[in-house]
Image (cartoon, rainbow, N blue to C red):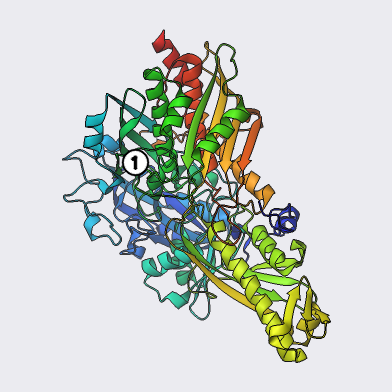
Amino acid sequence: MTTYKVVGQPATRTDGPEKVTGSAKYAADVQLPGVLWGKALRSPFPHARIRSIDTSKAEKLPGVHAVLTGKDVKGVMQGRTLRDLPPLAQNKVRFVGEKVAVVAADDEDIAEQALALIEVDYEELTPLTDPLEAMKDGAPLLHPDLLTYDGVLRPPEKPSNVFFSNTLGSGDVEKGFAEADQIFEDTYTTTRVHQAYLEPRACTVWVDGDGRVQVWATNKTPYNLKQALVAALELPEDQVVINHNYIGGDFGAKGPVMDECLCYFLSLKTGKPVKMVMEYIEEFMAGNPRHGSIIRVKTGVKNDGTITAHQEHLIFNSGAYAALMPWGFLAGVGGIAGNLRIPNAQFNVSHVYTNLIPCGYMRGPGEAQGTFAIESHVDDVARKMGMDPLEFRLKNTVRDEDLTPMGETFSNIRAVETLEAAVEASGYRDPKPVNVGRGIAMCARPGSPGETHCAVTLKPDGSVLLETSLFEQGSGTYTMLAQVAAEELGISAGRVHVQVWNTDMVPFDSGVAGSRTTRMAVPAAYDAAQNARTELIKQAAEVMGWPHDKVTYDGEVVVNQNTEEKLTWPELVARTPGAAVSGRAYSKQEGRPEVTSFCAQIAEIEVDPETGHVKLLRLTTAHDVGTVMSPVGHQGQINGGVVQGIGYGLMEDLIIEDGHVTTLSFSDYKVPSIGDIPPMQTVLLESNDGTGPYNVKAIGEAPTLGVAPAIANALADATGVRVNDLPLSAERVYRALREKK
């Protein structure tokens, strides 16, 4: 492994002082002169026709500046790709929490009072909440105008609530099943899960004196937000500016348009900036949680344990709209089972409209659901065949030159080494007490494509300004970029200051998402620093009259090799025109990288046979990594991902009854607390294999994916009971144990 002076070493967070002192500005902290508060009135019904809306009383309330309903935004449709969501309901509501009216008032209290004065006459309609019922021929169409929407990627052949379907995989599954000695089938379900970030969504929009739309929002993909607003509002691109503010957590959720369109219309009508901040009850009721799913699995196996074929039908309950997904579907499905050698694989995907909360992205979108199904199924197949699950996995784990189930190839495959490292560290083979079980799960996760920009400027006071187009969401990206610049300039990271551009500064940036940020951002920062060094040498030749080919850069010193004359770069920069030297770079990483990363996780649990309570005793997570850029941040990604996986596996459930979300606060919606987190052991298999100038690998999503199936497999090991439905709550496990008896 290559050792660096700054990269890979502990570093102080660049945003740390601002955040701990309270000076960091988030979207809700933006204070513009004359700003008004916006509040939305939401539907109490999952499916209803709007007969009439009377806003007259609200409009007369002192302090109210504007009231809008669907007729005021008629024809406007918003969405990241599939534009199927009106900012305010158009004659019909499709889920509990859909916005039907919005007000702008002097303060939040007056806005709330105004909402109470709006009278809406609804005609209730029968809701469609079961995706299997919604898929049937003859089911009522929730979006009869689907084919007229912009962004429909795979139009159904006939009218349907299945707005997107696709088939992925490789080989010939029918041939593979014909070659099998045994075939196993089962069904798995996963529930909706909220991302549970600390900061609820917020935005401020101001149509300024020049007619430009100035936006501050909790959005980590600002250029996608800009494009979405331009498309929805039919504005010129140069008329919309997304300004930077800090983001208080994301986990995949903070990418779509939420209230920005409404704030725009309110600002346009009132001539003032308008702010909207969602309360957490609104987050749970009308955010964009992880999809619930029904996954039907079929696997063919030889008697020696070799998998010959695997088939899945993944049905995602997408809720009332698809607008909140970046591509209108869950792109992560393409990463399922990348750790397994399956010569014949087929994954059939269906996204279905229902009268429920619209779903979006969360850490490993589609992968979290699919990994739970296949990793549970692989374990179950092994047990039913009388094989040790570990030996079964080792037999079917992908190796060099093997195709993944999606037909991809990667170099320097380290899946077996990662699995064996987890087994050794966890004591997987050690004897176990009664009611204690251990379970394994694995996943693979290459980085995603993306593009970004960066600039590095050397100043005469010895400081360095690093400018970036990224709006990071709290993951420590700015610290990592500062480390890269410091490494290449031979200085400490503390001398690098980070500044974030608004969307006027560069044509496009992909934003933070999809385990791609390090892959795309590090080359940009590296090249910008190198270009700054090159410019420094050029300036030394021009300003000092030194031969260009004899000027070198060594740490902070620029040297004339002919005369051995030296200058520190701050001294040289002070003599250059403008007293600054800059380098700029653009990074565009396309397609999948040549390498992927593997994660193997082993859960050890204890089950109370009287109550069904599952206690997580220990969690071991092993990762195939390249160069770890920032060890504290890297471990933070792992720890956070594991804890989210624990929540997904054991307790988190956005419960819906008759179309109504009933877990509307953190007292009802349970996330792991410190008492739920066991001793966690991390094993890192570092290497010089990776992408970019430092050989990096993705880490953002993999730590989450295997935890839930590892716990489910440990439950089967401890009790002999297989539970196919998440979360593995005490009540669910108790019922399964009683059924076994």
Left or right of 703 on screen, residue 681? right
**Place of residue 157 in the rendered image (x, y in percent of width and height, measured from the top left):** 17, 51
Q: Secondary structure at mark 1?
A: strand
**Place of residue 31 in the rendered image (x, y in percent of width and height, measured from the top left):** 63, 65
Q: Viewer-proximal residue, 260 or 502?
A: 502
Q: How many marks?
A: 1
State the image quarter where residue 457 is shown. bottom right
State the residue at coordinates (78%, 72%).
556
State the residue at coordinates (71%, 81%).
580
State the residue at coordinates (52%, 10%).
610
Q: Farthest residue toward the top?
A: 741
Give the residue at mark 1: 316
**Place of residue 321 in the rendered image (x, y in percent of width and height, measured from the top left):** 34, 50
Quadrant position of the C terminus in the picture: top left
Q: Farthest residue toward the front?
A: 562
Residue 252 seen in render: yes
**Place of residue 256 in the rendered image (x, y in percent of width and height, measured from the top left):** 45, 57
Residue 659 seen in render: no
